[in-house]
Each structure stands twice: as structure tokens, then as C-alpha cells.
Amino acid sequence: MTDAETAIRRYIARCFDGSAMPFTEFLDEVMETLHPLCDIATTGIYPLMPAERVDHDRVTAAIVKATGRTVDRVVVASGSCPFPQPDWMSAAVHHDHRRMMFWDELFASVRRTVAEDVALPLVGRYGVDYVANVRNTVNANLGEPLGVAVIRALGWGRDLGDAMLKRRISQLGIVQGGIIMPYVTAATLGDTAALEQLYPLVLLLSEILPIGERKDAPGVWIVLAA
């Protein structure tokens, strides 16, 4: 069992407030879902799926189930090759700027992230104070380590200064943590309906990064792959 998995498992067990269920079996099922993410957080190796292998139907079903929103089309953004080198741009300039420009444009293009769509209704249901306690545990054990792992997987760290690197890691941690946090919160409360609702999206998170719905094209959702 990884360090991250041990920490999350202990947290859920300590805070559990459910009833009428075999707790050990319940906890095992929850941690089985979180295991790939805990493994990534511990090893630092994020096996992002190549863009061409992303199953659009699976992504669509996961987003619809988790958010209840309409998904007309999924657009896969390639993190390793954000945009082709124009004829007029030198290779050096393209290499230095493509990733920074890509990431800023990616976030600027979405109405709000998938994580916000998932988290906000559940925060209202569970209460801000309760969720904040879960968020601290998730961010420390999964959010930031997963952000670092994505940066490493895409090879972006070498191109960014310390301040920009910390900003990117924080953004990635928020995106991922915003999906994981409601799942862990639901687990502490024994909310099996919410766990079922979020299950496909949490599984998807170990392979791709769901970003959000385009603000200029309702129904079009962006995900980040290798």
C-alpha cells in the first residue's frame, strides 16, 4: 500500500459517519477506485493516455454522470504537442513558448472546470467547513503530488521558472483535487449515491485530465491527454 493510499484510507476510517453497511468492504471498494491515483502520487509517474487512444464515449458518459450536464462533443487537447510549429516561427521560439501559451489559453477558454461542476453542488450539500477539512487532506496527499506528476509526464518543468512551475502545479492540483475531494467526502459520509455518480470520472482521472466546457461553445468539453 502506498503512502498516499495509507493516509487517505486512515482519514476516511477516522471520519466515517455512515451506517448500515459493512465498513471494511465499503472502504476497500473506495480505495480500489483511488488506488491508481494514490500510486501516481507516490511514484510520480502519470501514465497519461495518448490523445489518439482517448475513448470519447467513455469521457462523455463520465462527465454527464458526474455533472448532469450536456456533452455534445469531447475535444482532446494534446499536452505534449499543444500546437504545430508555424512556418514563420523558429524551432527555439516554438519550444520555449508553446507550452506556456497552451496552458494559459486552455484555462482561459473554459467556462469553468469539470472539477468546479462536480464539487460545487456537493459542497452545498455537505457544507463548506466539512469539505474544507477533506480538501486539506486530499491536496496534501493527492492534489499537489498529482500536479507535479502531470508536469513531469508532459515534460513541462524544464521550460518553466520556479514561480510559473508552482502556479501550474497548483492549477493542476485544483483540477484533480476538485474531482477527488468530493469522492473522498462522499466516502467519509457513506454517500453511496454520490460515490456511484463520481466513480467513472475518478477512474478516468488516472489516464486523462478533464478540463472543462468551452465558454464559447456550450456542450463542447476539453480534456488533456499526453
Image (cartoon, helix red, strand yellow):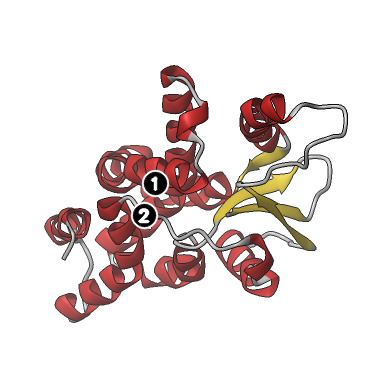
Name the image quarter holding residue 70.
bottom right
The secondary structure type at the circle numbered 1 is helix
- Residue at image position (35%, 39%) is 144
- Left or right for 3, reference 88: left
- Is disc 1 surrounded by few (<14), some (14 to 19) or many (20+) residues within 10 Å? many
Q: CA distance from mark 1 to mark 2?
A: 6 Å
The tally of labels here is 2
Q: Residue at x 41, y 55 (%)?
A: 46
Q: Where is 161 relative to 91, above or below?
A: above
Residue 157 at x, y percent in the picture = 45, 33
Label 2 Cα crowd, 10 Å radius (few <14 / some 14-19 / many 20+): some
Residue drawn where x is 65% and y is 72% of the image: 55
Which residue is identified by label 2?
Answer: 45
Q: Amino acid at mark 2?
A: Ile
* Residue 40 on image: x %, y %: 33, 56
Residue 149 tag number: 1
